Image: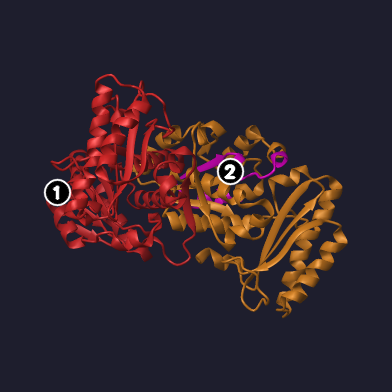
Chain colours: A red, B orange
Amino acid sequence: MKILRTVRELREALAEPRAAGAAVGMVPTMGALHEGHLSLVRAARAENAVVVLSIFVNPTQFTEAADLAAYPRTEETDAALAASAGVDIVFAPDAAEMYPAGYATTVSVRGPITETLEGAGRGSAHFDGVATVVSKLLLAALPDAAYFGRKDAQQLLVVQRMVADLGIPTRIVPCPTLRDADGLALSSRNARLSGEDRARALAIPRALEAVSAAVLSGETGVAALRARAGEVLIASDLEVEYLAFVDPDTLEEVATAERPVLCAIAARAGAVRLIDNVLLGRDPERREED
Amino acid sequence: MKILRTVRELREALAEPRAAGAAVGMVPTMGALHEGHLSLVRAARAENAVVVLSIFVNPTQFTEAADLAAYPRTEETDAALAASAGVDIVFAPDAAEMYPAGYATTVSVRGPITETLEGAGRGSAHFDGVATVVSKLLLAALPDAAYFGRKDAQQLLVVQRMVADLGIPTRIVPCPTLRDADGLALSSRNARLSGEDRARALAIPRALEAVSAAVLSGETGVAALRARAGEVLIASDLEVEYLAFVDPDTLEEVATAERPVLCAIAARAGAVRLIDNVLLGRDPERREED
């Protein structure tokens, strides 16, 4: 497995396999790899001759300096995990490689899909940072396919929109959220949870499970579903930022779950901000064929 | 010569020559082709096995509805000219192909190179429109090289910045401004000039020539150069929007022409807004190697 630091090296490494017709799959990450990332690698591995995993803690998508400073950086462990999962190339540029002096370009996706939920909580700069860095990473590798987790449902939607709009010739492949045995969605931020905060954070997947169960038993009123999730969250003493029931494609609020609905939660457990979501009323894997 | 309307058709047409190692050159235009565009085609023809010329009057870069409505559209003549100049593929999408329903993404270049001159006069939406459409056209064809005229010096700079920043794998090739025998820079807008306005418009190249001559004879003070150009322009009765002496790389105002300076003019002759520029103090062809 190669570890490359520059776009030039990455392109040189990909030129020969690409000329020979090899499919290239890419898994963009911010490092601090966990089983969720490795499941993306396995999905990429199954479909491509060459798998590139990028590690870049992108400063422009952080809207809080403290969050950026606290974000875990574990490159040696990451490299070992990537190698064992079958990654061929780790692309780990530094900030000066991605944003050299004089850098002046931003890719922005506008409208409800960036203004609501994370966009409302973290400001428009967050998704500008995401759209810009993902466009740069995809243009650096020009992969046939890139793999993103559904835990960051809104990020996935923003990336799909940006790639379709600009016409970046990469297929975006959504992959299921992975969870620990207790239900907590895997996230690099979980490492920063105290034992107590982690126990508290379990209210997030439990609230999502409660809502899913209610929909399966025939409840379609969002007011009733919200009350059901609210009971679980309030009992937990989490600081809930949003509990949203939205159209999974437009992220606009909905009043009923007669059609598929994305239920999304953001909450703080201690100093750690966590997000999670579930797609109600449709087999989540159906979306892969969208 | 093929005329293609969709990104899919364009990619299909380029797949085979590209797989065979053929270099692809692209000339993005808004149509109403003149000798200036054809000189870009010839430059592309000399360096590439396949030449694509795009024709798209991009609505998002027009900040005046009347200017968009009045912009000449002459596709049949354009196709004949393109064919005779050796174009292989004309890519002429409609607005719905470029910006389908739900389209939400903008590419923006920020800082002095978009805020001054045309950016100040036409608003930031103009260069957002330019950067976005050029990124989409380049990503549609993924050419090895794309050819832009120096008449739109600021547009060239914005495109160079955007392509470098996002890492679009295309070489941007600047090409010299072409002029009619009377000195007027070729522009699709010239067709809309009355005879009287055209005579008046000649003050623009004459002012640029006067400044160039003054620099060649040793004048380096921008105040003196501005006065020299001003004399010519004032006599013409043109409505001058700007007469600027700026750093050719940053577009920041300069006080002396001891180092290379871009002298740029925008002025209205009747209803037609014209721009032109000259690089002072350096062989303009030197910049090709930047």
**Residue B44: in magenta span:** yes
Question: Residue B281, percent across and down?
Answer: 64, 73
Q: Nearer the viewer, residue B57 or B42?
A: B57
Q: Nearer the viewer, residue A161 or B145?
A: A161
> Rounded to the nearest whole Å, what is the CA distance between mark 1 and mark 2?
53 Å
Q: Is residue B271 left or right of residue A223?
A: right
**Residue B158: in magenta span:** no
Q: Is residue B122 left or right of residue B29?
A: right
Residue at 33% across, 31% down = A227
Q: Which residue is mark 2?
A: B85
Q: Mark 1 packing: few (<14 Cα in 10 Å), some, or many (20+)?
A: some
Task: For mark 2, give the secondary structure.
Answer: helix
Q: Please report, as a chain letter, where disc 1 is located.
A: A
Q: Please report, as a chain letter, where disc 2 is located.
A: B
Q: Is residue A61 above or below residue A202?
A: below
Res. B239 image quadrant: bottom right
Question: Residue B226, percent across and down?
Answer: 76, 71
Question: Residue A259, percent across and down?
Answer: 36, 22
Residue at 39% across, 30% down = A247
The stretch in magenta equals B39-67
Please count the marks in the image: 2
Res. B244 image quadrant: bottom right
The reply to the same-chain question for discs 1 and 2 is no
| Type of the residue with mark 1 | Ala
Residue A271 visible somewhere in the drawing: yes
| Type of the residue with mark 2 | Ala
Q: Mark 2 packing: few (<14 Cα in 10 Å), some, or many (20+)?
A: some
Which disc number belongs to residue A85? 1
Q: Residue furthest top?
A: A218
Residue at 43% across, 39% down = A113
Q: Nearer the viewer, residue B161 or A40?
A: A40
Task: For mark 1, give the secondary structure.
Answer: helix
